[in-house]
Amino acid sequence: MPDPGLPDLATMTNGAFAVDAQVNLLEQSLTEWIRVFYDSPGNRAAVKLFANGMDTLIVFNHASDEVYYLNRMYVR
């Protein structure tokens, strides 16, 4: 299978940012965490979500009009 060419989001330049949010639902004993990346010069974005033992990364490559979904499950 060829490499899908995921963009490198580690390089943040002017016009790029990342935002983190954490949600704690005490009554359900749940914590969810989300990070949103946006890179205007690179024409890409990503959402990273960790919830219910699942680590999900969704990458939007607007230049090639592609979306990549990557999931990892953690055993509790």
Image (cartoon, grey):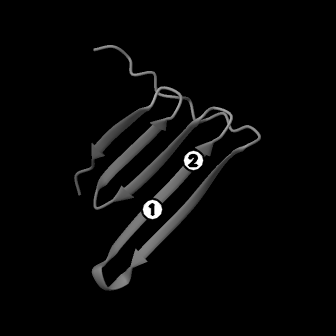
Q: Residue furthest bottom?
A: 27
Q: Is residue 42 left or right of residue 71?
A: right
- Between the C-alphas of marks 2 and 1, the distance is 14 Å
Q: Quadrant of residue 25?
A: bottom left
The residue pinned by badge 1 equals 33
Q: Secondary structure at mark 2?
A: strand
Which of these two is toward me, 67 or 51? Answer: 67
Q: Is residue 58 left or right of residue 35?
A: left
For the C terminus, give its image quadrant. bottom left
Q: Quadrant of residue 11?
A: top right
Image position of 12 with respect to 36: above or below: above
For the N terminus, give its image quadrant. top left
Residue 66 place in picture, x, y as percent: 41, 31
Residue 31 place in picture, x, y as percent: 39, 69
Residue positioned 40% across, 43% down in the render: 58
Which of these two is toward me, 54 or 66? Answer: 66
Depth check, mark 2 against mark 1: the one in front is 2
Name the kind of residue labelled 1 in the image.
Trp
Crowd band around label 2 with a 10 angstrom C-alpha radius: few (<14), some (14–19), many (20+): many
Name the kind of residue labelled 2 in the image.
Phe
Residue 62 place in picture, x, y as percent: 51, 34
Q: Which mark is residue 18?
A: none
Residue 36 place in picture, x, y as percent: 53, 52
Q: Secondary structure at mark 1?
A: strand
Image position of 47 with respect to 33: above or below: above
Report the label total.
2
The residue pinned by badge 2 equals 37
Residue positioned 22% across, 52% down in the render: 75
Residue positioned 60% across, 34% down in the render: 43
